[in-house]
Image: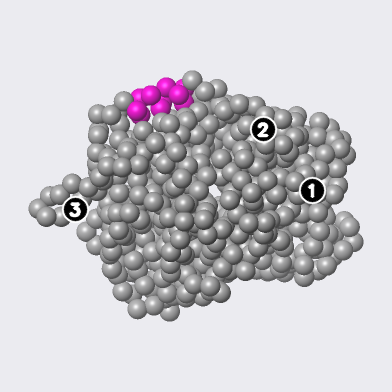
Amino acid sequence: MDGSTANRRNGVCLMYGWTGKILRINLTDQNISTEHPDHDRYREFLGGRGLGCRFLWDEVGPGTDPLSPGNKLIFMTGPITGTRVPASGRFSVTAKSPLTGTVFDSNSGGIWGVRLKKAGYDGLIIEGRSDQPVYLVIDEKQVRIKDAGGLWGLDVPKTTGLIQDAEGKAFSVACIGPAGENLVRISCIMNDNNRAMGRGGLGAVMGFKNLKAIAVKGSRQVPAADGEKLDFLNYETEKWLKANPITSQGLPEFGTPVLVNLFNEYGIFPSYNFRESQFPDAEKISGETLAEELLVKKKGCYGCPIKCTRVTRTGSDSGEGPEYESIWSLGPECGISDLETIAEANYLCNRLGLDTISTGVTIGCAMEMTENGTFDSGIRFGEQDKLKPLISDIAYKQGIGAELADGSRIFSEKHGGNGFAMQVKGLELPAYDPRGLQGMGLGFATSNRGGCHLRAYMVGPEVLGVPKMVDRFSSRGKAGLTIFYQNLNAAIDSLVICKFAALAVSEEYFARILTAVTGIHYKPQDLHLAGERIWNLERIYNIREGFSSRDDGLPERLLREPVKNGPSKGHVVELDSMLKDYYRFRGWDSTGTPAGKKLSELGLEGI
């Protein structure tokens, strides 16, 4: 990686891709300032997840309570956000998670991140805590802190609508619903009404700060160092997307629920709180059925040709989704097969600002504890009529919902049912049974933010054959492959670009695109090095917070209870052998701690 990102105009240093400017707002004293990070910081951490993690390391010290003024919300765009690059309308927010206690970033699409970038900012850092509810208004000319007393208590669509009525329809709004206001540990931040920074309880961080919403508007162009080359690469990228059956047919035609039937057939579609790896009524909730019965139209994020979002309508409600993960968590995970019930539960989560994955898995945990006799939560598998009222109770912390609001780990530990919480590091697992996906199991266990499929997304090579098919039942070779995808995805999350694009487009193209945008010559190995640097910084942040190799585990069910039936029958996750290789291949010591030599190689020796 070499070259310069900057030129000079009237003595001012300008960058391509990045604006070079971070907005900082202290809610305690209402101080508003801007700063200009060193260019090397951008080169090394790119933006998005990477730059957010570096700010978190520097500014949120050891032992900080996630629900305290010392925690920060760090919104970051990437160098290609707001450009013409397909599927690049994304951004991330980083904070210390109130659900897991780990470093945490959550990623979202829509238009909000593009508007922030076009307003002239690479990122926004929120610190301190307001005495009263407020919302922020940010555009190219000014930044204002406004009273949000009249908005507090409102759901996401009402909040968004009232702010746009007051400020203008050109503003994109990120906000919290009642769940975030009530400091629910599985609450999320919503943007553009239906897009979610869903995981880790970051909505509660925003709620603690008494920050109801952030409205942004911008129209500045994001210049590229080589616009002609970028146009060619964008043309080539769209060709790759059109040539791949996943991004040209499966996702555009059926959205993410296209995975339901496929994964059920493979025996990796968990149900009844991971007691089973298939669901007998999967066809009733599949992407094909959703398209036939509920679909109104298709929709996509800014600049995305894939358009995987489904706008849907039931007999009594409407909204966006449900996505694959939401169909699963609010459906088979809870033993529910009625698609309208699932869709309406998803709409409700979006309005109240709840993470659908953690909500469904926490409810599934409570259902199993009831049926097992461990603790009577008042709900059993398949009781679909109780689902929406319980979701509302979680958001408002009413009845048993007040306990479920803390997530499955805290809830199960409180009532003596720790083995029923399907989580890693406190983060509820998503819709993949790792007993039939050894690499995914390793990815879950080692994820720096807890049980997450998106850190490595080993479904690509283990099921979809992207870039090539590997034996999903074999643990051999999975450590190296998992590390490869963890590093690559850390870079992708920092550019920021949609991971679906990576199913069709190689890192060679991402490196060439980044070169054309920034004017810095990036090779594919430079992206992997940046991703490895980010991954290791996240790891040592967690170690600083008291995490260790003891936390790189999985629920006992997945390690000790073989799948009973179906294509994955007889399998458990062979984690121990993979972990040993994983630490060694990472260049860490046997306790999973990055060694001095590794940190030096990554330019992190000062840290």
Instruction: Based on the picture, tell me whether residue 385 belongs to the magenta stretch.
Output: no
Q: Residue at x 18, y 46 (%)?
A: 7
Prevailing secondary structure class for the magenta stretch in the rendered image: helix
Q: Is residue 255 visible?
A: yes
Q: Which residues are magenta?
A: 233-242
Q: Toward which corner of the image does residue 136 lie, by quadrant?
A: bottom left
Q: Residue at x 44, y 42 (%)?
A: 527
Q: Which residue is mark 2?
A: 462
Instruction: Based on the picture, tell me whether residue 239 belongs to the magenta stretch.
Output: yes
**Earlier residue among tags 1 and 2:** 2
Residue at the far right in the pictured view: 373
Q: Residue 148, relative to residue 305: is it above or below?
A: below
Residue 343 left/right relative to 42: right
Q: Position of residue 115 (x, y in %)?
A: 33, 49
Q: Nearer the viewer, residue 101 or 269?
A: 101
Q: CA distance from mark 1 to mark 3?
A: 54 Å
Q: Nearer the viewer, residue 499 or 142?
A: 499
Residue 19 left/right relative to 133: left
Mark carried by residue 13: 3
Q: CA distance from mark 2 to mark 3?
A: 46 Å
**Earlier residue among tags 2 and 3:** 3
Q: Is residue 276 visible?
A: no
Q: Nearer the viewer, residue 67 or 146?
A: 67
Mark 3 Cα within 10 Å, few/some/many (few <14, many 20+)? few
- Disc 3 on helix, strand or loop? strand
**Earlier residue among tags 1 and 3:** 3
Q: Toward which corner of the image does residue 516 lie, by quadrant?
A: top left
Q: Residue at x 30, y 44 (%)?
A: 17
Q: Which residue is mark 1?
A: 558
Q: Residue at x 85, y 49 (%)?
A: 560
Q: Position of residue 119 (x, y in %)?
A: 28, 53
- Amino acid on which disc 3 is placed: Cys
